[in-house]
Image (cartoon, rainbow, N blue to C red):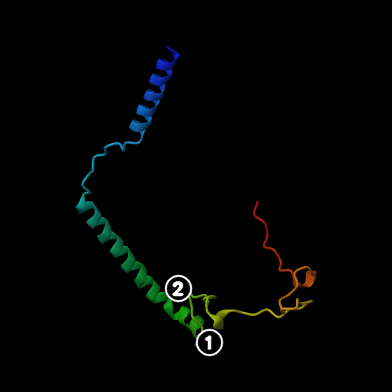
Amino acid sequence: MKKIIALFTVFAFMLNMAWAQEKPKTEKKEPVKTEKKEKVKTEKKEKAAKEAKKEEAKPADVKKEEAKPAGTKLKKDGTPDKRFKENKEAKPASGPVKKDGTPDKRFKENKEKAPAEKK
């Protein structure tokens, strides 16, 4: 009798596991196209208005860009892109250096100041 109950329990467990693997059927809803078009139109109008405002403010930004050397490559926000060699700044070692020429971080003079911790 114990064998039959154990067999039935195993069978019930396997059956439940098989049902658990099935994906539930979901109904696909057709998206409403008119709402999206209206949103896109309003977003385009807002972008056009923002661009017009940016164009008015650009003369001040152009002066900042002209001050940079012509060979530097900039990101969209106007800061130098550190991926390029000409934009990387090499810090001279003020204290002791290792054999390979890099600053030795064991000394106080070579440690970088940590930014203020957030609480």
The amino acid pointed to by label 2 is: Lys
Q: How packed is label 1: few (under 14 Cα within 10 Å), some, or many (20 or more)?
A: few
Q: Is residue 63 left or right of residue 12?
A: right
Q: Is residue 30 above or below residue 106?
A: above
Q: Which residue is mark 2?
A: 76
Residue drawn at (68%, 78%) of the image: 91
Quadrant position of residue 117? bottom right
Image coords of residue 65 (percent x, y): 49, 82
Q: Residue furthest top?
A: 1
Going by the picture, which residue comes out furthest to the bottom?
70
Q: Nearer the viewer, residue 92 or 4?
A: 4
Helix or strand or loop: what does disc 1 sit on?
Answer: loop
Q: Which quadrant holds the N terminus?
A: top left
The picture places residue 15, in percent across and down from the top left corner, at 35, 27
Residue depicted at 49% across the width and 75% down the height: 78
Q: Is residue 5 above or below residue 45?
A: above
Residues 95 and 55: in front is 95
Please report the residue visible at 37 percent of the width from the left and 24 percent of the height from the top.
Answer: 11
Q: Which residue does the numbered mark 1 point to in the structure image? A: 69
Q: Looking at the image, which is closer to me, 114 or 106?
A: 106
Residue 77 picture location, percent across and down: 47, 72
Category of crowding for the residue at label 2, using alpha-carbon neighbours closer than 10 angstroms: few (below 14), some (14–19), many (at least 20): few
Amino acid tagged 1: Pro
Asked if residue 80 lies left or right of residue 12, the reply is right
**Tag 2 secondary structure:** loop
